[in-house]
Amino acid sequence: MFSSNFIISPFQGQDENIHLEKWNKIKGQSQQLSKRLLCFPPESPIWAVGERMSMCASVLFFGYAEDGERRLRNTSYCRARLCPVCQWRRSLKVRGQMMEILDHVERTHGLRYIMFTVTVKNCDSSDLRSTLKDMLQAWGRLTRAAWFKKICVGVYRAVEVSINPSDKSCHPHIHAVLAVRPGYFSGRDYTKTEEWAVRWQEALESSYTPVVHVTVLRKPFQKSVAEIAKYSLKVSNLIELLNEIPDIMLADLHWGLSGLRLFSLSGVFRQAHKELHLSDMDTPEEDVSDDSCFDDVVIPYFWNAGLGCYQSGK
Ligand SMILES: [Zn+2]
């Protein structure tokens, strides 16, 4: 991708410590986690995930964009579900895309937004996969219902799991944004939080009343978007509890989240995603395929596992 005549030089006039601080922290977390996964027997698929994770974003290639800002130009991601680096980069991407989509839909359709969070009862990590599948099936039943379609013309949904620090149970939930017509709030279709809870319970086919949160998503969108586009597995949770979590639970968390579509769009949001030519939401950021927005300077930084930080490769 990079030709040999690229000039490799250190950053000029910028505080590289500040710039790399976040990278150092999150890559460090990824290293901690990969070390745990590498304790599995080498023939285990989880060991292979740990090996891939240990190499995630080992080299960062920065470049200067047209506006003179230094930006990440390229790196390679492990794409493991639990990887803190991949989750961080994906959440940044989802946030950026959702800001664009919400602005676009508001401008072109004049719609308003509701933030909708639905939960299910905590489960053991061994039941995480089946619980997530059941939750997503219930979500499908809810969003396909005629009454729902009458109210909502666009849906964004993100799956998130947190771990209860005391009993280590898993707490799966869905953060969603619903696009509704402006008349919704004063019309007959207005649905109170208690009614949303009943609808969610019906979709879940559960004997208990599940907890739901419903709020209006107001401008500026930044704060709300940060809320709805977080990590799929709360990383601070996982890292803090890493020494208390048994190996089997780590494997459960990995397999529980693997192969599921964690972020999805439908209706006007999906249409906007297409119109804005945005890339797949469910992956970390892609390599920059269009290098034309960068000048010819490429600055590589290599992860130094011993020191726990990135170092310039000059
Ligand atoms: Zn990764």
Image (cartoon, rainbow, N blue to C red):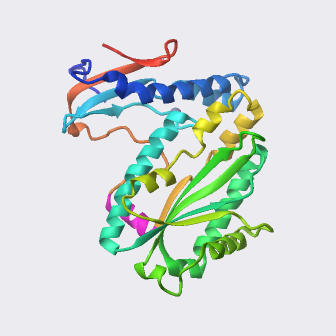
**Whether residue 279 is visible:** no
Residue at image location 42% in from the left, 50% down from the top: 95
The reply to whether the magenta stretch includes residue 202 is no
Residue lying furthest bottom in this view? 188
The reply to whether the magenta stretch includes residue 268 is yes
Give the x, y percent position of residue 261: 57, 53
Residue at image location 36% in from the left, 32% down from the top: 74
Q: In front here: 191 or 38? A: 191
Give the x, y percent position of residue 267: 45, 70
Give the x, y percent position of residue 147: 58, 81
- Magenta range is 267-276
The number of numbered discs placed on residues in the rendered structure image is 0
141 left or right, relative to 55: right
Residue lying furthest right in this view? 207
**Whether residue 45 is visible:** yes
Q: Compared with residue 280, is residue 237 higher up or lower down, i.e. above or below?
A: above
Q: Compared with residue 280, is residue 80 higher up or lower down, i.e. above or below?
A: above
Dominant secondary structure of the residues highlighted in magenta in the image: helix
Residue at image location 25% in from the left, 37% down from the top: 291
146 left or right, relative to 284: right
